[in-house]
């Protein structure tokens, strides 16, 4: 059975075995049925649904091709971190299907593929050059004319998408001034923003996800009603990414609009970057982060009923998935993935378990539990010192216990600094850092 939407029977099973998850499923908002067009084919969807999920539910797994070798790529993180889901959407190139919602009349197309991402004849590049393609020196030994022709051809075949048909009208940035900007509306960002609002300050929070809540929304064993919600006094821009920050200004973009936000205090709560880790063929469609599989499930899409779950967190998710009718989920709580097997999509995996090598076959998805890396770049742009954390095994901003960095007015909080921490710990950290930022701001308030 390919990926599918949960049936009423599935929902009843989940409600019996996992009340926390069934409450999430009940809370998801599903709009009226509609059709979205992908590569000329109509795909059943629901209004407002995440485009990548509509395509996944229709088993349209291969969404794009890699720029050089034309390797098939699919949604891996469902969080805007892997670029496996880039499509041309409504004439706009390089749109992340996992951060876009379906719209009536809009069409999605594969990019960088001929004729489609599902069947791309340019895939032969990968087979002709199994080890390495040095396009800079390709055909240099055959004379300048041949080399120039080759360079031109290479440029045409590679790259990411083509420009829109019509030039866009330049957009003026809308200017906003607030006391504090919080980047990231996960549990720590919500904690910080609410603390700042409670101190009577004007606060704006932004997040690239379609709704506030962050990764905690995918923690399927955490009851939904225990998650923190944004104080209504906090201004919130969802679907909006912070792309640069300098002096007291941060640039936000939502795909159409540009915002220039001046804030006396900036709180970075933008968490981590999800990845599946390093192993052979880790870009094969059908490889998912644990959170991506969970995210699809809580939005009513089962990515596979024959998945291999590797790692402790993935094992817990596998136990939930096994509640539903399946053809053979497998769980390997202690293993490490060495290789994903399969060219167009995952068919198997090679693992090491307790030092021994093991081959797993007959799967359609590989769900990997790898800790996220701190998304420290914006805090670094703001001037925070970035240091190596042996505990988190990644770089992270240096801070005091109250979240202050070496730059006055720049604070950091949440899994950006804590790594894998509980939902409650992340929220408590945000609340503490927000309270400290509020104190700092109020001490410097203009009389
Ligand atoms: S960026 Fe969309 S699935 Fe990873």
Image (spheres, grey):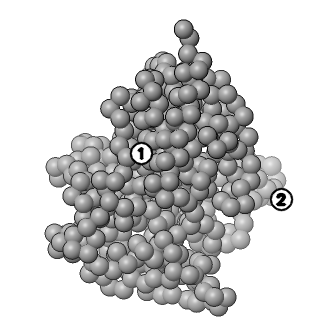
Q: Name the residue at 59% across, 49% down.
A: 416
Residue 199 image offset from top left, x and y in percent: 45, 27
Hey, which quadrant is residue 24 in on the image? bottom left
Q: Is the N terminus in the top left, top right, bottom left or bottom right quadrant?
A: bottom left
**Is 11 left or right of 269, judged from the image as shown?**
left
Residue placed at 34% from the left, 75% from the top? 321
Dot 2 surroundings within 10 Å: few (below 14), some, or many (20 or more)? few
Displayed quadrant of residue 44: bottom left
Residue 8: % across, % down: 16, 69
Give the camera-side residue of 357 and 102: 357
As helix, strand or loop, the secondary structure at mark 1 comes to loop
Q: Pointer 1: residues within 10 angstroms few (<14), some, or many (20+)?
A: many
- Residue located beneath label 2 in the image: 141
The answer to whether any part of residue 53 appears in the image is yes
Residue 424, position as x, y percentages in the image:
45, 54
| Residue 388 left/right relative to 341 | right
Q: Is residue 5 visible?
A: no
Instruction: Tell me what residue is drawn at x 33 percent, y 80 percent.
Output: 322
Residue 324: which quarter of the image?
A: bottom left
Q: Which residue is mark 1?
A: 209
Q: Position of residue 192 (x, y in %)?
A: 48, 38
* CB atoms of marks 2 and 1 within 8 Å: no
Disc nearest the viewer among 2 and 1: 1
Ligand 1 closer than 8 Å to the CB at disc 1? no
Q: How far is disc 2 from disc 1 in space, using C-alphas? A: 50 Å
């Amino acid at each position: 059975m390919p990926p599918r939407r949960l049936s009423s029977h599935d929902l009843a099973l989940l409600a019996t075995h996992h009340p926390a998850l069934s409450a999430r499923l009940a809370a998801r908002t599903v709009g009226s049925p509609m059709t979205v067009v992908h590569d000329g084919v109509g795909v059943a969807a629901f209004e407002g649904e995440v485009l990548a999920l509509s395509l996944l539910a229709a088993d349209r797994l291969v969404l794009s091709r890699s720029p050089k070798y034309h390797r098939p790529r699919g949604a891996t993180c469902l969080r805007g971190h892997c670029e496996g889901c880039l499509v041309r959407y409504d004439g706009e190139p390089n749109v992340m299907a996992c951060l876009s919602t379906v719209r009536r009349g809009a069409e999605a197309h594969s990019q960088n593929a001929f004729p489609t991402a599902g069947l791309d004849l340019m895939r032969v590049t990968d087979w002709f050059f199994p080890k390495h393609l040095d396009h800079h020196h390709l055909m240099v030994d055959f004379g300048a004319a041949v080399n120039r022709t080759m360079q031109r051809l290479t440029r045409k075949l590679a790259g990411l998408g083509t420009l829109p048909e019509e030039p866009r009208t330049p957009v003026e940035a809308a200017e906003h001034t607030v006391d504090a900007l919080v980047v990231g509306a996960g549990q720590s960002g919500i904690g910080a923003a609410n603390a700042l609002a409670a101190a009577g300050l004007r606060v704006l929070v932004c997040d690239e996800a379609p709704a506030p809540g962050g990764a905690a929304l995918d923690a399927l064993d955490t009851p939904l009603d225990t998650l923190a919600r944004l104080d209504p006094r906090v201004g919130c821009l969802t679907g909006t990414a912070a792309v640069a920050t300098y002096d007291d200004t941060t640039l936000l973009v939502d795909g159409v609009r540009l915002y220039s936000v001046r804030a006396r205090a900036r709180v970075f709560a933008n968490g981590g970057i999800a990845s599946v880790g390093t192993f052979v063929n880790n870009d094969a469609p059908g490889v998912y982060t644990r959170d991506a599989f969970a995210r699809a499930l809580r939005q009513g899409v089962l990515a596979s009923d024959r998945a291999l779950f590797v790692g402790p967190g993935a094992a817990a998710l596998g136990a939930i998935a096994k509640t539903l009718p399946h053809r053979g989920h497998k769980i390997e709580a202690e293993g490490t993935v060495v290789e994903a097997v399969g060219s167009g999509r995952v068919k198997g995996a090679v693992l090491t378990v307790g030092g021994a090598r093991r081959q797993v076959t007959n799967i359609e998805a590989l769900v990997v539990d790898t800790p996220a890396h701190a998304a420290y770049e914006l805090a670094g742009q703001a001037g925070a010192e970035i240091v190596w954390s042996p505990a988190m095994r990644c770089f992270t901003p240096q801070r005091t216990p109250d979240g202050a960095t070496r730059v006055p007015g720049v604070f950091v909080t949440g899994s950006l600094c804590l790594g894998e921490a509980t939902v409650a710990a992340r929220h408590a950290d945000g609340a503490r850092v927000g309270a400290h930022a509020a104190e700092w701001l109020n001490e410097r308030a203009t009389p």
